[in-house]
Amino acid sequence: MKRVTIKDVAVASGVSTATVSLVLREVPVVADATRLRVLAAIERTGYIYDRRAANMRSKRSMTVGLIVTDLRNPYFVELAMAIEVVLQERGFALLQGYSLDDRVRENRLLSVMVEQRVDGVVLLPAKDTTADELHARLGVVDLPHVLITRRVKAPIADYVGVDNVRGGDLLGEHLADQGHRTIAFLGGPRSTARSDRLRGLRAGLKRHGLALDETVATGATREDGIAAVDALIAHGPLPDAIAAYNDNVALGVMTALRAAGIEPGHDVAVAGFDDIPEASLQHPALTSVATYPRRVGAEASTLLLERIERNDLAPRRVIIEPSLAVRASTTVRGGVSTTSGSRRD
């Protein structure tokens, strides 16, 4: 039986072979009506697209790697979905890995990505990652890459992230405005994201003559939030307010407070970062700094695709402005609500 070719599909659909190729590669420039006609012809003729051969001709694998720390954090789920949407529109597939914030595991994953000949990598660096290591893993082989959420000290790569200093500042201002006078910062691995959030929080409080009472560095999970509160309770009286490294930690904080007979919001104000969908569904609803993972993912994908096309560009930075979603967890202390859910930019 004669093998069906791309020319047969072109004849069957009444278009050029170039147009059929665009449809097969999922390039979005083809009109919807034409694309549907080509797809119908492919089904009628039984044509099978040999993507592997096409990739060999183009010298691309049409795959992109994504490495984040832990997909159990809803922030990274939203981010990964946004990245996949942009890549799919350009005909790329996404290969994902999770470092668990371990540098050795991250290096192993990067080696796998290189071995699999991905066309580029979006990377959330593990907490101890250095610029030299990234260069050794990615720069030497000239693999296009974009860093997200956490910076490394040397500007060796494109970077996309939220302005964490500004986010911390917004939260510090809000907590001071609400009359909270003793504030602790709980959770988070020692990283540029954590240090920036702390720096901003301290700046917002300082304008009101306040300072952080205590900080507890942990991981970024709900279990870490529980452990941080247990440590805080063991040390003495609880503060007026707890600012958590992220919403995952904040949810753990709320769980631990209730387990100790302390009501979040009413007895101790609680706030977080990231404004994950679950934040607004809590009781009380959680005040949180919105860090826009979908925008981070879309911007990172766009930068990476541009760098895949041209890898001689100077390092670029996209910094996204955060906002503060004010909710009951920081505004009902003592049983009196001072504001309804609102957003401060």
Image (cartoon, rainbow, N blue to C red):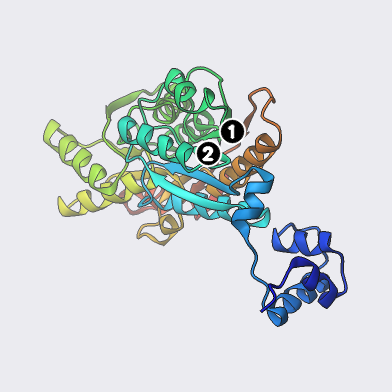
Coordinates of residue 306 in the picture (x, y in percent): 69, 38
The residue positioned 32% from the left and 41% from the top of the image is 100
Cβ–Cβ below 8 Å for labels 2 and 1? yes
Mark 2, secondary structure of its residue: strand
* Image x and y of residue 81, in percent: 53, 55
Residue marked by disc 1: 144
The residue where tag 2 is placed is 121
Q: Earlier in the sequence, mark 2 or mark 1?
A: 2
Would you say 177 lies left or right of 329 here? right
Please provide percent x and percent y for residue 73.
Answer: 38, 50
Closer to us: 305 or 281: 305
Residue type at mark 1?
Answer: Pro
Q: Residue furthest left?
A: 234
Q: Nearer the viewer, residue 165 or 43?
A: 43
Which of 141 and 215 lies nearest the eye of the viewer? 141
Count of marks overlaid on the render: 2
Q: Where is residue 278 drawn, in percent x and y?
A: 41, 58
Identity, as a three-letter code, of the amino acid under mark 2: Val
Residue at figure coordinates x 33%, y 54% from the top left? 335
Marks 2/1: CA distance?
Answer: 6 Å
Looking at the rendered structure, the secondary structure element under dot 1 is loop
**Please, which residue is most extreme toward the bottom here?**
44
Residue at 45% across, 27% down: 137
Q: Which mark is residue 251?
A: none
Residue 337 in sight: no
